[in-house]
Amino acid sequence: MRTAASVTLLLASLAVAREVPANLKSFYDSHKNGKCANPVSIAYNSGQKNADTHYCKDNGTGAIYLKDTSNGYADVDIDCDGSTTCEGDGSWQGQTAFKDQVSKFSNGAIKDLNTHIHTFVVLGNDNSKEEGDGGKKFDATKDGKIEPLSVVAVVCGDKLVYGVYGDINGGKVTGESSLALAKTCFPNEGLNGNKGHTKHDVLYLAFPGSDAVAKSAKWGAKTAAEFEASLAAIGDKLVKKIGSGTKSRIMRGTL
């Protein structure tokens, strides 16, 4: 017979995923092929080809998303920055871009994001001379009006997963996320700090405005499933702007 504690641990070990609502699925399908109708940045680098990914704007909601310059969306590269690193990572930095806000929102419970627990997305490209070419940058907070630690809807592996806008790329690479988000999306691909998901089939959809900020998230969560679930209340409201309703389901993951 399972104890209450064992049931809690079992539930915490499961990765939560949601079926993609009909209108969000329609958005995904209708924008996937062809070029971005409203690019708001230069073309950056997916990591597989040079200059193949724009930041694109949806005029109806003001949401920003990554779009391949031909067909598809973005891939998933692994960002191991923050309070811990991950296997295979050779470029770890000990903090994320919004470390101070994380500490503030968590009332000091944690000092920074943890790539193994917090499902976060990297948006924006500083394009510094050291990490990029020193050319035009894209600031998601200014150019896209996306506030730090806002909830981001991610369509990946035929499911909907929620993350937060948690870091900025110093160079020109796009499509980075935490290991927690990547594994929630693709639990059977053996992803690590040196191995990402290479297909350009992942939609990262970030919404503008203060109502998207995940101030009440479980920043001190012990598992990725617990943290991701704490974003659902805000995420569902945001997704309803382009789709209606979400049907939750529990799917086993590896986190």
Image (cartoon, grey):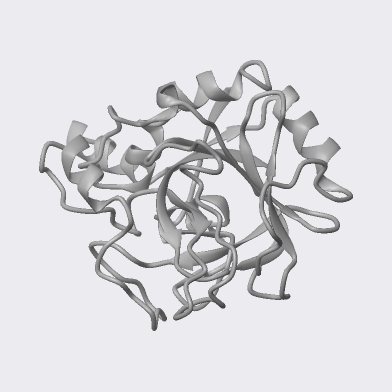
Q: Is residue 96 left or right of residue 156?
A: left
Looking at this rendering, what residue extends furthest in the left direction? 108
Report x, y in % for residue 118.
Answer: 35, 49
- Depicted 158 relative to depicted 234: above or below: below
Residue 109 falls in image quadrant? top left
Front-most of 29 and 41?
41
Front-most of 48 and 26?
48
Q: Give the total number of marks visible in the rendering.
A: 0
Q: Is residue 244 left or right of residue 87?
A: right
- Depicted 130 relative to depicted 116: above or below: below
Q: Is residue 245 left or right of residue 134?
A: right
Question: Measuring 48% from the left and 42% from the top, which residue is drawn there?
Answer: 142
* Viewport quadrant of the N terminus: top left
Looking at this rendering, what residue extends furthest in the front direction? 135
Front-most of 202 and 150?
150
Report x, y in % for residue 108.
Answer: 10, 43
- Depicted 8 relative to depicted 67: above or below: above
Report x, y in % for residue 138.
Answer: 55, 55
Question: Measuring 63% from the left and 29% from the top, which residue is drawn there?
Answer: 62
Report x, y in % for residue 64.
Answer: 62, 40
Question: Measuring 49% from the left and 46% from the top, which residue is drawn there?
Answer: 252
* Viewport quadrant of the C terminus: bottom left
